[in-house]
Image (cartoon, rainbow, N blue to C red):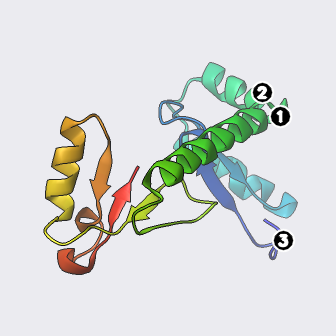
Amino acid sequence: MNFCPERVCHVSSLSDYLAVGLRSGFLLYPPDKVPVGRNVVQAMTHSFSPIISQLTCLLIQSGHAGALLGHIRDYRRERVRLAVNQLGRWNINWNEAADFIWLELTEGWYGSSFSFTSEKLGIQVAPADIFLPDEASAPTRCA
């Protein structure tokens, strides 16, 4: 919202940030666009529970949503740190801001077979070939 705030509308949802099950969204718009924003919200929420809307507003305005998001980010960072510590002896890549790591597979492994074998051992792995068209060059995403 900081870039051209007089022209930018931001649409998002709590399911993107806090939990998939929180099916409630929000719209931030410039003050001079209040009538347009109100019409959009009313058109998109004609069958949405007003109680859920009010609870969503309270969650955001009270600061609880921000606090929960901070806890979720801390938890995800810790999970990535644990994975990096466990898999550090192999060729891995990661970014502090992401909640996954990339593991380069050794010769003979393919993403789908590695994912299947890992799942049998209780480890969730999403093979990169489901994200990229070229399986041979795709790393494996550990989630």
CA neighbours of label 2 inside 10 A, class few (<14), some (14 to 19), many (20+): few
Earlier residue among tags 3 and 1: 3
Q: Amino acid at mark 1?
A: Gln
Label 2, on which residue? 58
Three-letter residue code for mark 3: Glu
Name the residue located 18 percent from the left edge and 72 percent from the top edge.
107
Helix, strand or loop at mark 1: helix
**Circle 3 — which element?**
loop
Report which residue position mark 1 lands on. Answer: 61
**Residue at 55 percent of width and 37 percent of height:** 45
Q: Relative to 54, is 105 above or below? A: below
Q: Earlier in the sequence, mark 3 or mark 2?
A: 3
Left or right relative to 17: residue 125: left
Disc 1 to disc 2, C-alpha distance: 5 Å
- Judging by the rendered image, the residue that carries numbered circle 3 is 6
Q: Are marks 3 and 2 in contact (CB under 8 Å)?
A: no
Q: Amino acid at mark 2?
A: Leu
* In the foreground, 67 or 63: 67
Q: Is residue 13 visible?
A: no
